[in-house]
Image: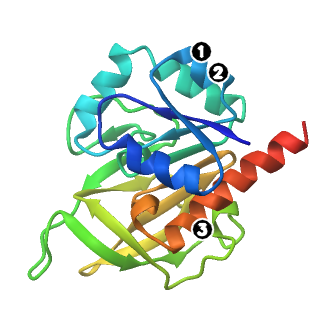
Amino acid sequence: MATIAVIDYDMGNLHSACKGLAMAGATPQITDRAADLDAADALVLPGDGAFDPAMQHLRSRDLVGPIQEAIAIGKPFLGICLGLQLLFDSSDEGTEAGLGIIPGYIKKFQKEPEITIPHMGWNQLTLAQPDMPLWQGIHTGDWVYFVHSYYAAPTDPAVIAATTTHGHQTVTAAIAKDNIMAMQYHPEKSAPAGLTMLANFVNLINARKSQG
């Protein structure tokens, strides 16, 4: 069974993500210890809240380097909501530097008549990387649950794995590059599509383990 380190940095409800992973057949371990990240089969970085406090908490716990190193050696990584945004260089939300793993930055939604900010609720996905491992059994038009006021603007649009719309704005809903996968929405709150995605992540880890 896959052991997944769910990174604890005091930003959001980690238990809902763990419940979804456990339902998908993994053994999630909430931790803020670098040794646990090193020993785990995969990492999950969930999160709710603001960009600057999140990066400050990661730095205060000496987790930035271990996260970067785990990704660099090819360990499967899943970012959820704020966990996607922290992968980037910077954010309109603050002044802290992000993890700098995916080039680009995080933009604030532009105000439009008749749209609410934050973007909160169910929206449909448009898949941009149909062969991405998380998309097995997932289709353009599937519904997932969002809560966010900012969205990712990657320097290289090829990393965008899915988009969604809010008002007249088309925004990044998910990214994928090599062993990195991340979602702006909450898969653990997006049943049944979200649970399928989490199961796909667990299956990917198990397949990697079986290959040695």
Q: Which residue is mark 2?
A: 38
In the image, residue 182 lies at what x, y percent? 51, 52
Q: Which mark is residue 70?
A: none
Q: Residue at x 66, y 29 (%)?
A: 40
Q: Secondary structure at mark 2?
A: helix
Classed neighbour count for the residue bearing mark 1: other residues with Cα under 10 Å, few (<14), some (14–19), many (≥20):
few
Q: How far is disc 3 from disc 2 in space, using C-alphas?
A: 26 Å
**Residue that numbered label 1 is attached to:** 35
Marks 3 and 1 sit apart, C-alpha to C-alpha, by 29 Å
Q: Residue at x 37, y 23 (%)?
A: 58
Q: Is residue 174 found left or right of 11 in the rendered image?
A: right
Q: Which image quarter is the N terminus in?
A: top right
Pick whichever of labels 3 and 1 is earlier in the sequence: 1
Q: Are marks 2 and 1 in contact (CB under 8 Å)?
A: yes
Instruction: Tell me, yes or no, if residue 158 can be seen here.
Output: no
Three-letter code for the amino acid on which mark 3 is drawn? Thr
Nearer the N terminus, badge 3 or badge 2?
A: 2
Label 3: state its secondary structure. Answer: helix
Query: As shown in the figure, which amino acid type bears the numbered disc 2?
Result: Asp
Where is residue 207? Give x, y as percent.
Answer: 82, 50
Give how far across and how far down residue 14 sits, in percent: 38, 41
User: Looking at numbered disc 1 in the image, what kind of residue is underneath it?
Assistant: Ala
- The residues tagged by marks 2 and 1 sit, at their Cα atoms, a distance apart of 5 Å
Instruction: Work out whether 193 lies above or below 182.
Output: below
Q: 34 or 113, which is in the foreground? A: 34
Identify the residue under disc 3.
Answer: 196
In the image, is residue 137 above or below residue 26? below
* Circle 1: element type: helix
Looking at the rendered image, the quarter that the C terminus falls into is: top right
